[in-house]
Amino acid sequence: MSFELILFYLFSFVLLIAALGVITVKNSVHAALLLVLTFFTAAALWLLLQAEFLAVALVLVYVGAVMVLFLFVVMMLDIKVEPLREGFVRYLPVGAVVALVMLVEMLGLIGLKAMSAQALPPDPAGASNTAWLGNALFTQFLLPFEVAAVILTVALVAAVVLTLRRRTGVKSQNPARQVAVKASERIRIVKMESVSKGGTP
Amino acid sequence: MPFSLHDLFLLLPEAFLLFAICAVLAVDLVIKPAQRDLTHWLSIAVLVATLVLVVGFPAEPGRGFSGMFVHDAVSRLLKVFILLVVLAVFVYARTYLRDRNLHVGEFYLLCLFATLGMMLLVSAGSLVMIYVGLELLTLSSYALVALNRDSPLSSEAAMKYFVLGALASGILLYGMSMIYGATGTLDLQKIHAVASLAAGSSHQTLLAFGLVFLVAGIGFKFGAAPFHMWLPDVYQGSPTAVTTFIGSAPKIAAFGMAWRLLDGALGGLHPHWGEMLAVLAVLSLAIGNVVAIAQTNLKRMLAYSTISHVGFLLLGLANGTPSGYAAAMFYAIAYAIMATAAFGSIQLLARAGFEAEEIDDFKGLNQRNPWYAFVVLLVMASLAGIPPLFGFFAKLMVLKAAIDAGMMWLAIAAIVFAIVGAFYYLRVIKVMYFDPPVQKGALALPQDIPLRWILSINGAALLFLGLFFGPLLGWCYRAMGAG
């Protein structure tokens, strides 16, 4: 058993336990943290496959940005998950049976043999997979790459239309009007007749 | 050379549409809410210009962007009708949305983005393009369904649509990954070549395995039974203008996607998917037509009628012959035009604070406005498949193709359920012509002249295309290479 294989089993074990934890722990903050661990271990597995760029991207994007944001949201919203999981134990046997049947069917259909791993041929040019990915994204996969950008734009437009509310009667500042203010609008000079109070010394 | 100027030339209509959407987005940002009509007319102008580019497109059929984008007769035909239907949807929508304070520029923008997604979807030459095109379409649709965010019904519909749509996308992706694993390529043409060779090998089971997931994903997107659960709630819950959109043009695009995936990539596996589609078709016909009878809400009834029409469409696809595909394409186009008119008539009758979505709201329409009662009669009769209307010939062609392909029992089942289905369409006609009106006096028509015209044109088109269905049918046959 090579060292690589031992590492693979170790990481896979941690990954499975962490993933199981995500859906079973009661505290949603813990679940989010376990998801971070899951992503991190998956990144380690990718490193073992020599997909270093994807591994780094997973850590940077998912662990670094997405999950931190997620954690913020979970903490801010303070969701009580207890009521959501009421039926968990009751439906567990049914779910387990369905999952087991599906697993047996899949294995029966495909068989374990078809899934046996084959080592990927090494890249003849010896280029790193970062260079290869960059090349592929901007040549062969240029069109889907650009369309993916359009999808992100749609997400932006959709987020704005679904959440932006213009409330009336809210006190807010309008910097443009503040800057454009004139002196005449700031001070109103009121001419008053001087009145003698009479009788004072 | 990864790509050349020729590739960009192929992409001209889509590229124009994308830049035009960005321009409309910028214009909509600076105008005042009172000038929202400007966005409306600009969006219509953008659609017309794109249509001109598609129709007057001089490029020869070909593939571009390393096979990602396919320009052929089918994609052009589908694009023309997608654009025409979206155009009609926009004209219908304006007054309805304004009466409900929903007349925002984003409605048009999201519809245009979805249109772009549909155009890319019907031109997809690779599994990746199918997926991103579909996501562009469905992501915009989710947001559109939730447009009326103060309505609990609308929010519920959007949540259901989003969760089930995400699940369907996941299933579709899973199937795609299986097919990629079996063939080692994402290109639909190459998959076709490899899949035909793979007969009998161990790859065949893996391919069939992926195929099951693909068919399930396609069934979800079409709303075919037993994957139809989301459809009635979404149709009923979303604003009628949005229902008109998601109920019409996306069906044409879904046909394009199913054809590219099933025939373009996995044509060699027709014995497998032909049977799956036949089962989906019969289930859809049965569930759609029978459950629609029990509905009192017109939008919900039309949703179940959609399911039954999808059954007919799948019947054409299940043949696996060019004439079957041509009949299914003809059906998809016919259904999109009929659905636009059906939901459009609800929008015409609706006023501020009144939805006109119950069947009872159509009571005595003939006494209140004979002309629009006649238009609704045309629409319902066409949906039911009564000659000489458009819907009849669409059904006829599908049945003819099914019988030619030797699928006699399927054709008989389709006819039986079509007759069952005629009941609920005829009920709407009976309610309009023979029941006393609930509200007295002439129908208060909206001030929007284009809206009044478009419904008349749409209804007349059903009659006209029914009487002169030859050219369009011939176009479908030629595009599919069925002679």
Image (cartoon, coloured by chain):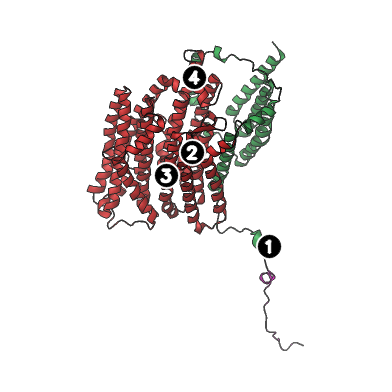
Chain colours: A green, B red
**Residue on which the image places disc 1:** A179
Which residue is depicted at the point 70% across and 12% down?
Answer: A2
Q: x%, y% of residue B205?
A: 48, 16
Q: Are marks 2 and 3 on the same chain?
A: yes
- Residue type at mark 3 is Leu
Question: Magenta residues?
Answer: A182-201
Distance (Cα) linking label 4 and label 1 = 68 Å
Q: Residue at x 34, y 49 (%)?
A: B457
Q: Are marks 3 and 1 in contact (CB under 8 Å)?
A: no
Residue holding disc 4:
B195
Q: Which residue type does callout 4 highlight?
A: Ala
Q: Which residue is mark 3?
A: B84
Please, which residue is most extreme toward the right here? Answer: A201
Front-most of residues A106 and B114: B114
Residue B119: mark in rendering: 2
Marking on residue B78: none
**In the shown orientation, is residue B75 left or right of residue B334?**
right
Tell which subunit mark 3 falls on. B
Q: Residues within 10 Å of mark 4 (few under 14, many from 20)?
A: many
Q: Chain of mark 1?
A: A
